[in-house]
C-alpha cells in the first residue's frame, strides 16, 4: 500500500526592487532587494516511497532539481537515509526571475519536516534553505522581505497591500549567470532606500510602490532579450501604475488598478500574441 502524499503550494516571487552593489570577495554579488510572494504557484507533493529520493518534474526531473537537493540536505541533517517521492506540478516558468526552482525546494523542506514530525526548527530549515540557493530562504518564509547579502539575509518589511498584477514572460528566458556577467561589463551599481520602501508599504499605496520600482539588471537582460523592454512599454500603455522585470528576467510584471483591469490587460496581451500571461496578486508569508 502506498503512503499518502503531503501537498502544498510553492509560490513564485517577484522583486519590487533589486540593486546590485558590487562583487564580493567570494565572487557573488552583494544585493539589496524588496522581495514579494505572488499567487502564481507550483504544486509540490511529497510522500515516503522506496529507499531512495525520486523527483518527478517533467524535463526538470532528477538529481539536478533543487527539490531533490533540498531532500538530500534534509536527510543529511537528520543523519538518515530514506526513500521519498517528490512530485511537482510545474506552473512557474523557468528562466523567468520568479524563483520557481527555489520555491519548489522550499516547499520540499517544509513538507519533509511535516512528514517526519518536525524534527528541525525553523532556524535550521532556513540554514538548509541557504545551502540550496540564495532565494530558497525567502521562498520558505514568503511575504514581503528586505533581502541583502546574496539575497539570503532577510528582514521583515511591512506587509504589502493586496496588489493585482499582470505577469508576462517572453518566449526567451534569461540565464541568471549571463545576466550578472553582462551587468559586470555594462551595468552601474545601485542602492535602495529601505526607509522609502517602508513608508510606501505602510501607506499601502500601489502608486507609491510603483514609483519606487527599480532593477539594476534590466539593462543587461534587455540586451539579451529585447522583448522585455517592449512588454514593459505595452503594460504602461495599458495604464498599469508601474512595470518592472523581475529578478534577472525575463518575466515582466505590471501593477494593475484592480483585478478587472488586470484581466483586461492580460487579454489584450494574449490577443497580441503573448502566450505566457498570468493574472496574479501578492500573497502573505507562510508558516515554517
Image (cartoon, helix red, strand yellow):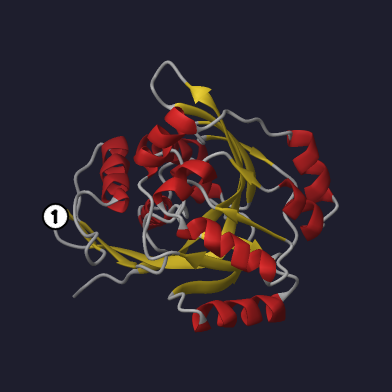
Left or right of 99: which side holds 282? right
Left or right, residue 240 beside residue 185: right
Residue sitting nearer the eye, 195 or 79: 195
Question: Which of 117 and 226 lies nearest the eye of the viewer?
Answer: 226
Locate residue 61 relative to residue 41 in the image: left or right.
left
Position in image of residue 15 (x %, y %): 58, 49
Q: Is residue 263 visible?
A: yes
| Residue 139 against residue 48 in the figure, above or below | above
Left or right for 123, reference 156: left
* Residue at the top extreme of this rendering: 25
Residue at point 30% right, 39% down?
Answer: 78
Where is mark 1, residue-wise?
51
Q: For the point 27% across and 45% down, which residue is it?
A: 69
Residue 72: quarter of image: top left
x, y percent for residue 142: 57, 51
Q: Secondary structure at mark 1?
A: loop
Quick one: label 1, few (<14), some, or many (20+) residues within 10 Å?
A: few
- The extreme left residue here reads 51
Residue 28 locus on image (x, y percent): 42, 27
Q: Is residue 282 in view? A: no
Count of picture labels: 1
Residue at 47 percent across and 32 percent down: it is 186
Amino acid at each position: 500500500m502506498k503512503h499518502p502524499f503531503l501537498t502544498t503550494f510553492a509560490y513564485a516571487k517577484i522583486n519590487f526592487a533589486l540593486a546590485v552593489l558590487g562583487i564580493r570577495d567570494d565572487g557573488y554579488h552583494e544585493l539589496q532587494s524588496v522581495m514579494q510572494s505572488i499567487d502564481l504557484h507550483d504544486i509540490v507533493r511529497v510522500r515516503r516511497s522506496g529507499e531512495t529520493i525520486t523527483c518527478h518534474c517533467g524535463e526538470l526531473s532528477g538529481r539536478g532539481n533543487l527539490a531533490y537537493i533540498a531532500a538530500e540536505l534534509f536527510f543529511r541533517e537528520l543523519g538518515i537515509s530514506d526513500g521519498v517521492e517528490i512530485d511537482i506540478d510545474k506552473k512557474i516558468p523557468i528562466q523567468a526571475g520568479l524563483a520557481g526552482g527555489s520555491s519548489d525546494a522550499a516547499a520540499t523542506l517544509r513538507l519533509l519536516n511535516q512528514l517526519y514530525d518536525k524534527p528541525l526548527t525553523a532556524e535550521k530549515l532556513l540554514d538548509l534553505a541557504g545551502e540550496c540557493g540564495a532565494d530558497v530562504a525567502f521562498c520558505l518564509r514568503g511575504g514581503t522581505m528586505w533581502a541583502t547579502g546574496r539575497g539570503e539575509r532577510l528582514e521583515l518589511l511591512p506587509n504589502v497591500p493586496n496588489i493585482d498584477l499582470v505577469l508576462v514572460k517572453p518566449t526567451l528566458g534569461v540565464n541568471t549567470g549571463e545576466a550578472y556577467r553582462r551587468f559586470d561589463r555594462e551595468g552601474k551599481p545601485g542602492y535602495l532606500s529601505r526607509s522609502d520602501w517602508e513608508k510606501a508599504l505602510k501607506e499601502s499605496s500601489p502608486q507609491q510602490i510603483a514609483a519606487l520600482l527599480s532593477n539594476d539588471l534590466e539593462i543587461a537582460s534587455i540586451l539579451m532579450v529585447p522583448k522585455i523592454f517592449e512588454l514593459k512599454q505595452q503594460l504602461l500603455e495599458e495604464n498599469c501604475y508601474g512595470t518592472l522585470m523581475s529578478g534577472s528576467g525575463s518575466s515582466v510584471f505590471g501593477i494593475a488598478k484592480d483585478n478587472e483591469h488586470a484581466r483586461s490587460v492580460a487579454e489584450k496581451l494574449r490577443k497580441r500574441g503573448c502566450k505566457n500571461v498570468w493574472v496574479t496578486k501578492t500573497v502573505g508569508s507562510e508558516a515554517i
